[in-house]
Amino acid sequence: MSKATFVARPKRAEPWTRLGSKVRLASLLTILVPASIFALFLFLTGTDFMAGLVTVFLPLQLLFGAWAGFYAFGKRGILDGLLLVITFFLAFFVLVMLASVLWSVIEAGFRAMSPHFIYQNNVYVSGKTGLEIGGAGHAIVGTSIVVGITSLVTVPLGVATAVYLTETRDFGRGTVRTLLQAMSAIPSVVAGLFIYSLLIISGWSGYSGLMGALALIPLMLPTVSRVAEESLRNVSRDLRNGALALGAPSYRAFLMVTLPAAQSGLVTAILLGIARVIGETAPLLLTMALANGTNANPLEGGMTTLPSYIFSFIALGDPSSIARAWGAALVLLIFVGLLFAAARVASAPKKVKKRSA
Amino acid sequence: MSMAPAKRKLLSKPSRVEDKIFFAVAKAAGYSSFVIIGMILVFLSIRAWPAFESQGVLNFTFGTFWDNSLTPPIFHIGPMVWGSLLIATLAVTIAVPMAISIAYFIEFLAPKFIAKIATVIVDLLAAIPSVVIGLWGLGIFSPVGAGWAQMLNESLSGVLPFLSNSAGTFLRSPFIAGIVLGVMIVPLISSVTREMFSQIDGELIKGALALGATRESVLRRVILPTSAGGILGGVLLALGRAMGETVAIFFVLNLTYDRFNFFNILEPVGGNIASLILAKFGEAAPIEVEALMAAGVVLFIITLIINALASYIVQKAQPWRKD
C-alpha cells in the first residue's frame, strides 16, 4: 500500500476560468474579423458610421459570435455567443454615450474657464459679451447659500427621521417610509410650485434665495433619510443592546454608541443629499429671481445659482452665452464630482482592525 | 463593600425626561413627512381648484388647446399628458436593455479594473445635474440624433408609419427628447439592477454551471428570474423620474398645445407637463398660474401612482428589506 500523498492544491484551481485554445482562437477571430471588415467597409464606401454600425457591423458580429460559440462549445454555445455580443455591444454603446456627456462638459467647459470666470459676476454681461469679462462667481455664492440653508434644515430633519425609522417602535413607521418614497417621486417643478403657492402668491415673501432653499427641502429629505436609515440599520443590534444593558438611557446609547458607529454612513447621507439638490433647476426658476450681481442676502433680492445660471445662458442662445453655460456646467460638475468622491471615501469599508478578544 | 445599586423598575417605555425628549424629537421628525406631503397636496389643490372648476377636470386633463388670450381662456393639457407618457415610455424602452446590459457587464463579465472604471462613470452620471444633461442634449446630441432620425425616417418610414415626418426638420422631436431622457435614467436603472445582481447567491450560479448550464441559460433561468421584481421596481422608479423631469428636455422638445401627436415620434410635435409649467410660468397671468398649478397636481398624481406601484413591487421583490 502506498502512503497517501497529498497533492498540493494548484494555485488556480478554478478550471472554469481557464479558457481552452479553441475558445481563445474563436474569441480572437470574433473580435478581430468583423471589426476589420467594418473598418474596410467604412473606408471603401464612406458610409455614415452609425448606419454602418447597425447595418453591417452588428449583423456580422452576431454571426461571428454565434459561430464562435458553436465552434467552441457546440450547439449550446450559439446562444452564449449571441448573448455576449449583444451585451458587449449595448454596454459599450451606453458607456460611449455617458462618456460623451462627461467629455463634452470637460472639453467645452475648459474653453470657457479662466480665473475671472470663477470670481467675477455677471454685471455688464449680455449674451453676446465675449468671455474676457464676467463669470459665474455670483452663481457659486448663490448655490453655496441656497444649498447651505437647505442642508441646515434637511440634514437634522433627515437624520432624525432615520432615527425615528430605526430606533423607535412607533406604529407609523411603515407609513412614513411610504411617504418618504412618495416624496422622492415629487417632480422638482412641483416642489417649486408648492413653495410658490404657499408663500409667494399669498404675499408672505417675494422671490428670494430663502424660498428656493425651502423648495429644495422635500427633494433632499428622502435621500438623506434613506441613506441615513440604511447606515443606522447596519449598526449591530448587539452594540445597542449592550449599551442599554449597561444602564445607558436610550438617548445616550444612541449618541455615544450608535451614532459614532454609523458616522461614515451619515456623512455619506449628507453628501449624497447635497449632490441630489445642487443641480436642481426647475424649483429655483419658479421661486427665485435671477440677478446679475453678487447677492449674499437670502431674504431679499434676486440670487443666481449655478443651475439657473446655466439655464438662463442656454436660453439666451448666442454662441458665447452657450460657452458660458458649458463653463458653469463644468464648475457644477466639479462640485458634484467632489461630493461624490468624498461620499465614496466616507463610505469605503475601513481597513479591518484586529478585534480585541 | 459597595452598596448594591437600587432596584430599577423594568419598563418598556422610556421613563427619563431625556429619553422622552429624544423619542419625541425623532417622532416629530418622522411625522414631518406627513406634514410636508399633506401641505403640498392641500396647497396645490386649493390654488389649482379654480382652474379645475372652470375648465372641468376631464376637459382639463384630456382636452386639447391652451390659450390665455380667449375669454374665457382655455387651458387643456391633454397633449402634454400624452407627451409626457410617450417620452417617458420611449426613454425607458431605450434605457432598459442598455442598463441591464451594462449591469450584467459590470457584475459578471468585465475584468475588475474595467468594471471599476465603468462603475465610476455610471455612478457619476447618476449624480449629474439634469440641466447639464439638457445642455449636452441641446449642444452635442441634438444634431447627431437628428441625423439618426433622418436615417430611420428615410430607410424605414415606408414599413413603419410612425417613423414618418412631414415637418422637414428632425430637431426637437419626442425621439430626441426620449433618448436624452434615456441617457439620464440609464444610470438609475443600472444601479438598481446591479444591486439586485449582486444580491444573487453566487453558489446558485456555480451550481447551475456545474449542472451544465451555459452563460445564456444561467442568465435566463437563474439571474433574471431572481432579480426580475427588483429590476421592474427600479424601472418604474426611473419612469416616475422621467415623467417629472423638466430641464433636461426643455430645450430639446417642441411643445404643441393644439393637437395630439400619438405615435409619430420623429415629428417635432411633442408635449410635456413639466416643460409646460416652466415655459408658461414666466409671463403667466394669475388665472394661468392657477391652470399651471392644476397641471402640477396632475403631474404629481401620475408620478405618485407610478411610484406607489414601484415601491409595492420592490417591497415584494426584496423581502429582506422589511424591518
Image (tube, grey):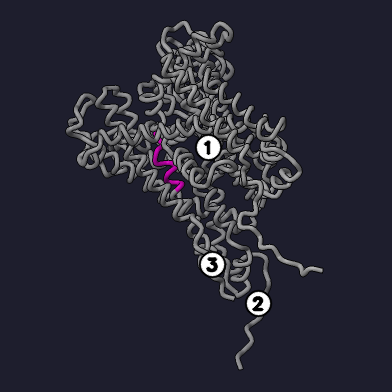
Q: Amino acid at mark 1?
A: Leu
Q: How far, Cα to Cα, is label 2 from label 3? A: 22 Å
Residue pointed to by mark 3: A257
Q: Please provide percent x and percent y for residue A32.
A: 51, 30
Q: Amino acid at mark 3?
A: Val
Mark drawn on residue B59: none
Magenta region, residue range: A272-282
A157 shown above or below B138: below
A4 shown above or below B49: below
A245 shown above or below A303: below
**In the orientation shown, which residue stands out farthest toward the front?**
A1
Residue pointed to by mark 2: B8
Chain where mark 3 sits: A
Whether the magenta-drawn stretch holds residue B155 is answered as no
Q: Is residue A185 left or right of residue A334?
A: right
Residue pointed to by mark 1: B188
Seen at 44% across and 24% down, the residue is B275
What secondary structure is found at the residue carrying circle 1? helix
Circle 2 or circle 1, nearest the eye: 1
